[in-house]
Image: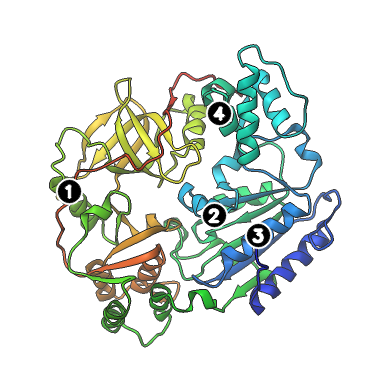
Amino acid sequence: MSAPAVIFSEDQAEAYDRIAEGLASAGVDISDAILTPPSDGKSSVLAVLGKAGSGKTLLLSELYKSLRSAGVEIVTGDYESKRSLERRSLAILAPTNKAASVLRMRGVPATTIHRILYTPVYDPEYEKIAEWLAGDGEKPEIEELSEEALERAAAFFSKMPSIPGALAAAGLRGSDFIRGWKRREEPLDIGLVDEASMLDSRQFEDLQEIFPNLLLFGDPAQLAPVNQSGAMVFDSVPDSQTLNLRRIHRQDADNPILDLAHALADPDVDFHSFENLVEEAARKDDRVVWGQRVEVDLMARSPVLVWRNATRIRLINAFRQVHGAPEDALLEGEPLICDGLELPLKYRKKRLDLEARGLIKGAQVIYLGPGRKAGFSRLHVMGAEDPQVSAASIVKIEKPDEEEPFIPYAANMGATFLHGAAVTIHKAQGSQWEAVQVFAPDLYAAARMGRTEAGQPLWKRLAYVAITRAQERLYWIVRARLSKPSGPLRTDDLRRIPAAPLALETVEVE
């Protein structure tokens, strides 16, 4: 049974046609499925802008389907055939694992920008399996793998076109077949970038070097990166290359969460009148909750969104106290946020390995317990395609009114983590959760300060980003209280696969 045809709104149809026209001039005709070799020297950047509910993701998804049907090769960062340079190629990118996973849940094979900037170097013996699975080689004979193992790999790949996943199904670990990582040397072709409001100028420059045909999908009402002084990279795209989606679609018209987000655009709506709208929405629809306290059960998987760091730290410590967490250790199931990597320059390749597995700044992870080696932790990386890893970790638990954080676990070097029961709204950008709690007293503090960003009151931008992180239910928390947990922290809801080790002594490839 075929899926129903997608019906575009007028502005979506116009944007699709403009994009198709631009691709055709670059040698990719998605209407007639005609591909011609790329021409050197030509490059273009298009920006597709729209607020939440305007249909950006639907448009991106349909463009992906059209390009795939036209014969364009999809590049995911897992593995690339040596013959891929001869073909027209497409990569769908997002700044974070969580943002990429939102697209993957919709059937779009998105990956992080990092996984495209740095490519895996496969062991030559196992690369033969990858070439065979990709349709570019004969079925190999590998001494270490049985015929049955190869068939398991082929069966997995037929259902999910992931080379690492297929090799794992054959009984291999990443450290068996990936020797290291190197920065991409050859350019690709077409890049579709979601959540482009999160890009900084350095990332934008990197993407322009790799993709002569670049499409940015972004929401101008969100927050700009902290180091961008309120500007977003698509602000520099000429008006003639910018497509605006203004209509909010019928399927979103009865969504009270989006109604609240769009009400923030009204200049006559101040903080108090906005709270009245939230309270009224909560009376009419259970998808909006007027909360008198923070629901602690939600914090293990969906952090409370705050503006001020002091609020974040207080909520984290309250979360740990009600769960009876000891001061000198983490409980299994505690949420963490990756705060970067502390590695010396000689371990640059190791940094690429960690980041490629999803441990990039801002990644949300769940602590599963100590690793086998001192200083190592077993972790579940939320939104990552291969989520469970074991990595050298430095965990920092910040304390109220104390400058230095408490460190329950510390390797000499590795991935650093902060607690993730509460995060700032800036760090939450690009992520979505089924249920989101927004700590309203922080937004009121921002409103009282009267700060603006790019001509908009800061509290409105903060509220817009925070509200649109909620997929199903929004909790507007108005008091600094915390509920009691209904039970202990859990990890049984996470996909159970063996944690792949990320030891510092892996082979480095220049």
Q: Is residue 111 above or below residue 60?
A: above
- Name the residue that disc number 1 marks: 317
- Where's residue 124, x and y in %? 68, 20
The CA span between labels 3 and 2 is 16 Å
Dot 4 falls on a residue whose secondary structure is helix
Q: Amino acid at mark 3?
A: Leu
The CA span between labels 4 and 2 is 24 Å
* 483 and 438: which is toward the camera: 483
116 with respect to 296 (left or right): right
Label 3 with label 2: CB-CB less than 8 Å: no
Q: Earlier in the sequence, mark 4 or mark 2?
A: 2
- Name the residue that disc number 3 marks: 215
Residues packed near mark 3 inside 10 Å, few (<14), some (14 to 19) or many (20 plus): many
Where is the C terminus found, in terms of image quarters? top right
Q: Residue at x 45, y 67 (%)?
A: 222
Q: Residue at x 61, y 47 (%)?
A: 206
Q: Nearer the viewer, mark 1 or mark 2?
A: 2
Q: Residue at x 58, y 66 (%)?
A: 56
* 342 and 302: which is toward the camera: 302
- Where's residue 73, x and y in %? 73, 45
Q: Earlier in the sequence, mark 1 or mark 3?
A: 3
- Name the residue that disc number 4 marks: 169
Label 1 with label 2: CB-CB less than 8 Å: no
Q: Earlier in the sequence, mark 1 or mark 4?
A: 4
Dot 2 falls on a residue whose secondary structure is helix
Label 1 with label 3: CB-CB less than 8 Å: no
Q: Residue furthest front?
A: 1
Q: Earlier in the sequence, mark 3 or mark 4?
A: 4
168 with respect to 344 (left or right): right
Q: Nearer the viewer, mark 3 or mark 2?
A: 2
User: Is residue 267 visible in this depiction of the protein?
Assistant: yes
- Name the residue that disc number 2 marks: 103
